[in-house]
Amino acid sequence: MRSPSSLLDTVESGPMADVVAALEEDIILGRIHPRERLTEDSLMARFKVKRHIVRDALSALSRSGIVEKERNKGAVVREFTPREVENIYEMRESLHRLGAERIPLPADGKLLSQLRDIQADHSAAVEVGNLRRVYRLNNEFHEAIFSASGNPYLADEIAYFAWLSHAIRSYRLADRQLLEQARSEHIQMIEALAAGNRAELVRLCVEHILPSKRAYLTSIQLLMSTAAAG
Protein backbone atom coordinates (compact mmCIF):
# COMPACT_ATOMS: atom_id res chain seq x y z
CA MET A 1 0.00 0.00 0.00
CA ARG A 2 1.23 3.49 -0.86
CA SER A 3 0.45 4.81 2.62
CA PRO A 4 -1.06 3.35 5.78
CA SER A 5 -4.58 4.10 6.90
CA SER A 6 -2.99 4.87 10.25
CA LEU A 7 0.43 6.26 11.08
CA LEU A 8 0.68 3.51 13.71
CA ASP A 9 1.21 0.98 10.92
CA THR A 10 4.68 2.47 10.43
CA VAL A 11 5.70 3.03 14.07
CA GLU A 12 7.23 0.39 16.30
CA SER A 13 5.60 -0.24 19.67
CA GLY A 14 6.88 1.61 22.71
CA PRO A 15 6.52 4.99 24.46
CA MET A 16 6.90 6.96 21.24
CA ALA A 17 4.18 4.88 19.57
CA ASP A 18 1.88 5.57 22.52
CA VAL A 19 2.37 9.32 22.11
CA VAL A 20 1.81 9.10 18.34
CA ALA A 21 -1.35 7.02 18.86
CA ALA A 22 -2.84 9.46 21.34
CA LEU A 23 -2.05 12.56 19.28
CA GLU A 24 -3.19 10.98 16.02
CA GLU A 25 -6.48 10.04 17.67
CA ASP A 26 -6.90 13.54 19.15
CA ILE A 27 -6.39 15.09 15.71
CA ILE A 28 -8.62 12.60 13.90
CA LEU A 29 -11.42 13.03 16.41
CA GLY A 30 -11.15 16.80 16.47
CA ARG A 31 -10.01 17.12 20.08
CA ILE A 32 -6.98 19.05 18.82
CA HIS A 33 -7.81 21.62 16.17
CA PRO A 34 -5.99 22.96 13.07
CA ARG A 35 -3.25 25.50 13.92
CA GLU A 36 -3.24 24.36 17.56
CA ARG A 37 0.30 24.27 18.93
CA LEU A 38 1.85 21.06 20.24
CA THR A 39 4.57 22.14 22.65
CA GLU A 40 7.22 19.73 23.83
CA ASP A 41 6.91 20.76 27.49
CA SER A 42 3.14 20.25 27.61
CA LEU A 43 3.41 16.87 25.87
CA MET A 44 6.20 15.76 28.19
CA ALA A 45 3.98 16.59 31.16
CA ARG A 46 0.92 14.94 29.65
CA PHE A 47 2.59 11.66 28.69
CA LYS A 48 5.32 11.64 31.35
CA VAL A 49 8.05 10.92 28.82
CA LYS A 50 11.42 12.48 28.01
CA ARG A 51 11.93 15.21 25.44
CA HIS A 52 13.52 13.00 22.78
CA ILE A 53 10.44 10.75 22.75
CA VAL A 54 8.15 13.74 22.21
CA ARG A 55 10.42 15.06 19.46
CA ASP A 56 10.44 11.69 17.71
CA ALA A 57 6.65 11.51 17.94
CA LEU A 58 6.23 15.01 16.49
CA SER A 59 8.67 14.15 13.70
CA ALA A 60 6.62 11.06 12.84
CA LEU A 61 3.42 13.11 12.79
CA SER A 62 5.14 15.72 10.63
CA ARG A 63 6.21 13.07 8.12
CA SER A 64 2.60 11.89 7.97
CA GLY A 65 1.48 15.36 6.87
CA ILE A 66 -0.98 16.03 9.71
CA VAL A 67 1.43 18.12 11.79
CA GLU A 68 3.72 20.92 10.62
CA LYS A 69 6.94 21.89 12.36
CA GLU A 70 7.54 25.62 12.30
CA ARG A 71 10.96 27.07 12.90
CA ASN A 72 11.34 28.55 16.40
CA LYS A 73 7.65 27.88 17.09
CA GLY A 74 7.45 24.11 17.52
CA ALA A 75 4.75 21.99 15.94
CA VAL A 76 1.17 22.81 15.00
CA VAL A 77 -1.68 20.71 13.68
CA ARG A 78 -1.82 21.18 9.94
CA GLU A 79 -4.53 23.42 8.56
CA PHE A 80 -5.53 22.75 4.97
CA THR A 81 -6.25 25.78 2.83
CA PRO A 82 -9.55 25.84 0.91
CA ARG A 83 -7.61 25.19 -2.30
CA GLU A 84 -5.84 22.17 -0.77
CA VAL A 85 -9.17 20.77 0.41
CA GLU A 86 -10.68 21.23 -3.06
CA ASN A 87 -7.67 19.54 -4.70
CA ILE A 88 -7.68 16.59 -2.32
CA TYR A 89 -11.39 16.04 -2.74
CA GLU A 90 -11.21 16.37 -6.51
CA MET A 91 -8.84 13.40 -6.39
CA ARG A 92 -11.00 11.50 -3.91
CA GLU A 93 -14.18 11.97 -5.96
CA SER A 94 -12.46 10.81 -9.16
CA LEU A 95 -10.91 7.79 -7.49
CA HIS A 96 -14.13 6.76 -5.74
CA ARG A 97 -16.05 7.04 -9.00
CA LEU A 98 -13.45 4.94 -10.82
CA GLY A 99 -13.39 2.33 -8.06
CA ALA A 100 -17.17 2.00 -7.96
CA GLU A 101 -17.29 1.62 -11.74
CA ARG A 102 -14.94 -1.36 -11.59
CA ILE A 103 -16.53 -3.49 -8.88
CA PRO A 104 -18.16 -6.59 -10.42
CA LEU A 105 -21.94 -6.44 -9.94
CA PRO A 106 -23.98 -7.86 -8.44
CA ALA A 107 -21.42 -8.30 -5.67
CA ASP A 108 -20.64 -11.83 -4.54
CA GLY A 109 -21.99 -13.18 -1.29
CA LYS A 110 -18.60 -13.19 0.43
CA LEU A 111 -18.12 -9.44 -0.06
CA LEU A 112 -21.68 -8.66 0.98
CA SER A 113 -21.34 -10.76 4.13
CA GLN A 114 -18.05 -9.05 4.99
CA LEU A 115 -19.55 -5.59 4.51
CA ARG A 116 -22.66 -6.41 6.54
CA ASP A 117 -20.50 -7.65 9.43
CA ILE A 118 -18.34 -4.51 9.35
CA GLN A 119 -21.38 -2.27 9.14
CA ALA A 120 -23.08 -4.00 12.06
CA ASP A 121 -20.01 -3.20 14.18
CA HIS A 122 -19.87 0.34 12.77
CA SER A 123 -23.53 0.94 13.65
CA ALA A 124 -22.97 -0.34 17.17
CA ALA A 125 -20.00 2.01 17.58
CA VAL A 126 -22.11 4.94 16.36
CA GLU A 127 -24.83 4.07 18.87
CA VAL A 128 -22.48 4.16 21.87
CA GLY A 129 -20.43 7.09 20.61
CA ASN A 130 -17.15 5.19 20.31
CA LEU A 131 -15.67 7.58 17.76
CA ARG A 132 -12.27 5.92 17.54
CA ARG A 133 -13.94 2.64 16.61
CA VAL A 134 -16.29 4.44 14.21
CA TYR A 135 -13.27 5.89 12.42
CA ARG A 136 -11.43 2.55 12.18
CA LEU A 137 -14.49 0.63 11.01
CA ASN A 138 -15.34 3.30 8.44
CA ASN A 139 -11.87 2.85 6.96
CA GLU A 140 -12.29 -0.92 7.02
CA PHE A 141 -15.66 -0.68 5.25
CA HIS A 142 -14.32 1.43 2.40
CA GLU A 143 -11.13 -0.59 2.04
CA ALA A 144 -13.27 -3.73 1.65
CA ILE A 145 -15.46 -2.12 -1.01
CA PHE A 146 -12.66 -0.72 -3.15
CA SER A 147 -10.48 -3.79 -2.81
CA ALA A 148 -13.26 -5.49 -4.78
CA SER A 149 -12.44 -3.26 -7.78
CA GLY A 150 -9.82 -5.82 -8.76
CA ASN A 151 -7.14 -3.12 -9.13
CA PRO A 152 -4.86 -3.05 -6.08
CA TYR A 153 -3.12 0.13 -7.27
CA LEU A 154 -6.44 1.95 -7.48
CA ALA A 155 -7.45 0.64 -4.05
CA ASP A 156 -4.14 1.86 -2.62
CA GLU A 157 -4.60 5.35 -4.08
CA ILE A 158 -8.10 5.55 -2.59
CA ALA A 159 -6.70 4.51 0.80
CA TYR A 160 -3.84 7.02 0.47
CA PHE A 161 -6.13 10.00 -0.12
CA ALA A 162 -8.43 8.85 2.68
CA TRP A 163 -5.38 8.78 4.96
CA LEU A 164 -4.16 12.17 3.71
CA SER A 165 -7.54 13.74 4.48
CA HIS A 166 -8.21 12.20 7.89
CA ALA A 167 -7.79 15.51 9.71
CA ILE A 168 -10.44 16.94 7.38
CA ARG A 169 -12.70 13.93 7.87
CA SER A 170 -12.66 14.41 11.66
CA TYR A 171 -15.27 17.15 11.29
CA ARG A 172 -17.82 14.54 10.30
CA LEU A 173 -17.12 12.54 13.45
CA ALA A 174 -18.01 15.51 15.61
CA ASP A 175 -21.51 15.77 14.14
CA ARG A 176 -24.06 13.15 15.20
CA GLN A 177 -26.34 13.91 12.26
CA LEU A 178 -23.50 13.38 9.79
CA LEU A 179 -22.57 10.11 11.53
CA GLU A 180 -26.12 8.88 11.13
CA GLN A 181 -26.06 9.91 7.48
CA ALA A 182 -22.81 8.00 6.93
CA ARG A 183 -24.27 4.91 8.55
CA SER A 184 -27.37 5.11 6.32
CA GLU A 185 -25.24 5.56 3.21
CA HIS A 186 -23.14 2.50 4.07
CA ILE A 187 -26.31 0.42 4.22
CA GLN A 188 -27.47 1.87 0.89
CA MET A 189 -24.09 0.97 -0.67
CA ILE A 190 -24.51 -2.64 0.42
CA GLU A 191 -28.01 -2.66 -1.08
CA ALA A 192 -26.72 -1.21 -4.37
CA LEU A 193 -23.95 -3.81 -4.49
CA ALA A 194 -26.43 -6.62 -3.89
CA ALA A 195 -28.90 -5.31 -6.47
CA GLY A 196 -26.24 -4.63 -9.10
CA ASN A 197 -27.27 -0.96 -9.28
CA ARG A 198 -24.11 0.62 -10.70
CA ALA A 199 -25.45 4.18 -11.01
CA GLU A 200 -26.60 4.25 -7.40
CA LEU A 201 -23.34 2.74 -6.14
CA VAL A 202 -21.26 5.34 -8.00
CA ARG A 203 -23.47 8.17 -6.73
CA LEU A 204 -23.21 6.98 -3.13
CA CYS A 205 -19.45 6.40 -3.21
CA VAL A 206 -18.88 9.95 -4.46
CA GLU A 207 -21.47 11.86 -2.45
CA HIS A 208 -20.62 9.97 0.75
CA ILE A 209 -17.31 11.81 1.16
CA LEU A 210 -18.59 15.34 0.53
CA PRO A 211 -20.13 16.25 3.93
CA SER A 212 -16.67 16.16 5.58
CA LYS A 213 -15.31 18.49 2.92
CA ARG A 214 -18.19 20.92 3.40
CA ALA A 215 -17.89 20.83 7.19
CA TYR A 216 -14.16 21.56 7.06
CA LEU A 217 -14.56 24.42 4.58
CA THR A 218 -17.32 25.90 6.73
CA SER A 219 -15.03 25.76 9.77
CA ILE A 220 -12.28 27.55 7.84
CA GLN A 221 -14.70 30.27 6.73
CA LEU A 222 -15.86 30.76 10.32
CA LEU A 223 -12.27 31.05 11.56
CA MET A 224 -11.45 33.57 8.83
CA SER A 225 -14.55 35.61 9.63
CA THR A 226 -13.74 35.59 13.35
CA ALA A 227 -10.15 36.65 12.68
CA ALA A 228 -11.29 39.46 10.38
CA ALA A 229 -13.83 40.68 12.94
CA GLY A 230 -11.20 40.68 15.68
Image (cartoon, helix red, strand yellow):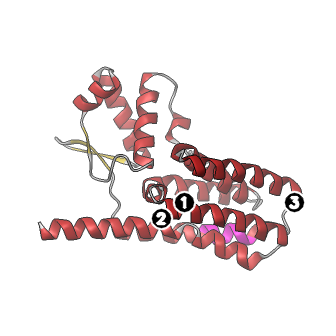
**Numbered disc 3: secondary structure:** loop
Which of disc 3 and disc 1 is earlier in sequence? 3
The chief SS type of the magenta part is helix
| Left or right: 86 as drawn, with respect to 108 | left
Farthest residue toward the front? 128
Which residue does the image show at 52% across and 47% down from the upper left? 131
Farthest residue toward the bottom? 199
Which of disc 2 and disc 3 is earlier in sequence? 3
Residue position marked by numbered label 1 in the rendering: 179
**Is residue 38 highlighted in magenta?**
no
Q: Residues within 10 Å of mark 2 (few under 14, many from 20)?
A: many
**Numbered disc 1: secondary structure:** helix
Q: Residues within 10 Å of mark 3 (few under 14, many from 20)?
A: few
**Numbered disc 2: secondary structure:** helix
The span picked out in magenta is 95-101
Q: Which mark is in front, 1 or 2?
A: 1
On residue 160, which mark appears?
A: none
Which residue does the image show at 32% across and 51% down from the upper left? 33
Q: Which mark is in front, 1 or 3?
A: 1
Q: Quadrant of the C terminus?
A: bottom left
Q: Amino acid at mark 2?
A: Ser
Is residue 81 among what the camera can see? yes
Residue position marked by numbered label 2 in the rendering: 212
| Left or right: 39 as drawn, with respect to 128 | left
Q: CA distance from mark 1 to mark 2?
A: 10 Å
Pointers 3 and 2 in contact (CB under 8 A)?
no
Residue position marked by numbered label 3 in the rendering: 108
Farthest residue toward the left? 230
